[in-house]
Image (cartoon, rainbow, N blue to C red):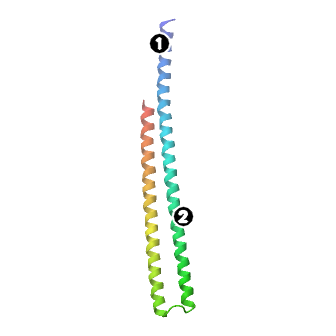
Amino acid sequence: MTTTRRHSLNTVRGDVASLQSRLSAVESSIIKMADAVTDLTRELKRTNDEIRLMRMEISLMRMELRRMNDDMSSGRRHSYQQSLGEHAATQRLIREMANEMIERNEQNRREENKKILDALTSLNKTVEQSVRI
């Protein structure tokens, strides 16, 4: 084998080793990304479950308001003013609870978005490093 051929063969072997190393790094990054997606999916499911629970709570509050309205209409309350006061207090409570739920949901979304951004930034850095190898 001539020196030129031997040199070419060594160059090809080096290139193959370099490509295998890069491929390994990319595969590792893909696995990390898949894990991050799994974690984010789990968080999304938890957030959706919380939203579903909030909707159920709101529905129960609405049913309670309807019952109170029915009670007021049928004259079961001792005084109309007392009923109005209770109704207004219940409405305030529902508004406060709804605002708290909305705020909690927005906070959860901000946290989710930050986690996604952090995961993607980390993945991007890993891929850049593996490509530079």
1 relative to 36, above or below: above
Pinpoint residue 82: horizontal percent, then vertical percent: 46, 90
What residue is at 50 percent from the left and 62 percent from the top? 50
Residue drawn at (46%, 92%) of the image: 81
Q: Amino acid at mark 1?
A: His
Element under disc 2: helix
- Residue placed most toward the observer, 58 or 128: 58
Q: Which residue position holds label 1?
A: 7
Percent x, y of residue 32: 47, 40
What is the crowding at mark 1: few (fewer than 14 residues within 10 Å), some, or many (at least 20)?
Answer: few
Q: Earlier in the sequence, mark 1 or mark 2?
A: 1
Q: Estimate the x, y position of residue 91 in percent, counting from the top left.
A: 47, 80
**15 is higher (above) or lower (below) than 77:** above
Q: Which residue is mark 2?
A: 52
- The residue drawn where x is 44% and y is 46% is 119
Q: Position of residue 25 (x, y in %)?
A: 46, 32
9 displayed left or right of 122: right
Q: Are marks 1 and 2 in contact (CB under 8 Å)?
A: no
In the rendered image, the quadrant that contains the C terminus is top left
Task: Judge by depth and name the residue closer to the eye, 101 or 6.
Answer: 101
* Residue, far top: 1
The image quarter containing residue 128 is: top left
Within the image, what quadrant is residue 112 found in?
A: bottom left
Looking at the picture, which amino acid does disc 2 mark?
A: Arg
